Amino acid sequence: MKFKYLAIVILSIFHIACSKKEVSDKVVFTNEWELVILDSIQVDYLGTVDGGDFRNGKGVFYNFEENKLIEFDSNGRILNETTYPKDGPGKVQYPTQLKYAQDGRLFAASFMGWLYELNTNLTLKQEIKLSFLSQSQDGGGFIKNLEYYNDSLISFYPGRDDANPYGPHFIRDNFLLEKIDPTTGGSKPLIKIPSTSRYSTNKFFERPIIQFGISRNKLHLALSNEPLIHIYDLTNGEIYLNTVDFKPSKFLDNGEHKEKNQYISHFKMLDGRINQLFVTEKGTVVYYKEGIEEEIFIQNELKLRENYPNYKDFQNQVLKIIYQDSILSNEIIVPYNIGSILNIEKLDKPFYSLRNDDFIGEEQDYLTFYKLQLEKK
C-alpha cells in the first residue's frame, strides 16, 4: 500500500510540474503586449515638432516655422541646433524627413523632394541631386519613407520618366522607390506594388501615402489606407516575398470610386489610416487610427477644419505588432496624450514619442517626450 501511495504522490507531482510547464510555455509564447510609459524627458525648446528620428541614444526633430533642426540626447540635453537659410549658401528647405544611419550619419528629405546629408553639427554637408526632379508635394512629418541601406539612400522620390504621383494609377504603373547613391546622385528604381494590393488593378481608390522600412535585407512597404504590409527581399533583385494582412478589428474604408481623383475621406467619413510604420529585426510595428463612420462624421460636422481636433473622440489610435512576418499581436490602444513616435529600433528597447500637450491642455516652456516600452503581458 505504501508503494501505491508513493506512486500516486509521484504522479501528482509530475502532473503539477507538467501543468506548470504548460503555463510557463504559454507565458513564454504569448503575443499579448502592452505599452508602458517608463519615464519622460524635457527638451528646453518651445516650438512645434514636424518630423523626427531617434537612434543610438540621440534624437533630432524639425521645426517648420523656423526651418530649424534640434538634436538632443536621452536626458533631454540639446546637443545641436541649426536654423537654415531657404536660399543662398547652406540652403536647406523643409527637412521634415529625418533618418539616422547606423553609423550615425544624418540624412534628410524635404516634403518637396530635396535630399540632404548633414554634418554632425547639423550644418549642410551636401545636397543630393538626382538627374530628375521629384514631383511630390507632400509626405513630410513623421511619415517613414526615407531609409539608408548598403551605402545607398532608399527614398520615395517620384518623378522618373515624368511620372505624376497624383495620377489615378501611379502606384499600379510605376516603380515606387528610388535607390540613390548619395555621393553621385545616381539612382535606380525599385519595388512595384504586388497583385495582392487593390492598387494593382484598374479600379479607382483614394490616393494613399507610401511608407516603408528596412531591417537587414527585408523591406516592408505599406499604403496608408490598406491594412496590408508587402514584404520584399533586397538581397537579389528586390524580390517580392509575401503580403501580410494585420487584420485590424476596425479600419474603415470608403471603397472603390466611380471616378478618378475622387475624395470621400475627410468629406463624408474618415478612412482608417496607417500613420507610422517601424520595421525591426524581430517584428514590424504598425501605428494606425481606425477611422470614423459616416453618420458620426456628419452629425459632428467633422468636415470643418475647426473640428479636426475632435477626431480623437470617435476613433482609437492603435499599435499592432507583426511578429516574424506572420504572428499578430493584440491591438494595443494608445492614449491620446501620446503623440507621434520618433522611432522604434527594437521590440525590446525603449523608444520615445512626443507628448501631445494639446490633448493634455497644458502650456509648457519646453517639449516633453515620453520614454516608452513595449512589454509582453
Image (cartoon, rainbow, N blue to C red):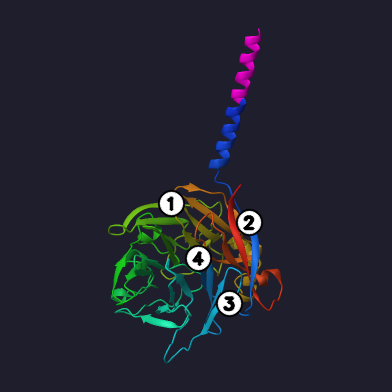
Q: Is residue 83 above or below residue 16?
A: below
Asked if the stretch drawn in magenta spans residue 245, the answer is no
Q: Which residue has dot 3 on it?
A: 78
Q: Which residue has dot 4 on it?
A: 56
Label 1 vs 2, first from the N-terminus: 2
Residue situated in front as seen by the camera: 32 or 20: 20
Label 4 vs 1, first from the N-terminus: 4
Label 2 vs 4, first from the N-terminus: 2
Q: Residues within 10 Å of mark 1 (few under 14, many from 20)?
A: some
Specify the quadrant that holds the N terminus.
top right
Q: Is residue 75 visible?
A: yes
Residue 36's mark? 2
Residues marked 1 and 2 touching at CB (< 8 Å): no
Real-space CA distance between mark 3 and mark 2, rounded to the nearest whole angstrom:
25 Å
Residue situated in front as seen by the camera: 292 or 160: 160
Residues marked 4 and 1 touching at CB (< 8 Å): no
Q: Secondary structure at mark 1?
A: strand
The secondary structure that most of the magenta stretch takes on is helix
Q: Amino acid at mark 2?
A: Val
Q: Secondary structure at mark 3?
A: strand
Query: Which residue corresponds to the image point at 31% horizontal and 73% vertical from the top-left?
Result: 181
Q: Which residue has dot 1 on it?
A: 244
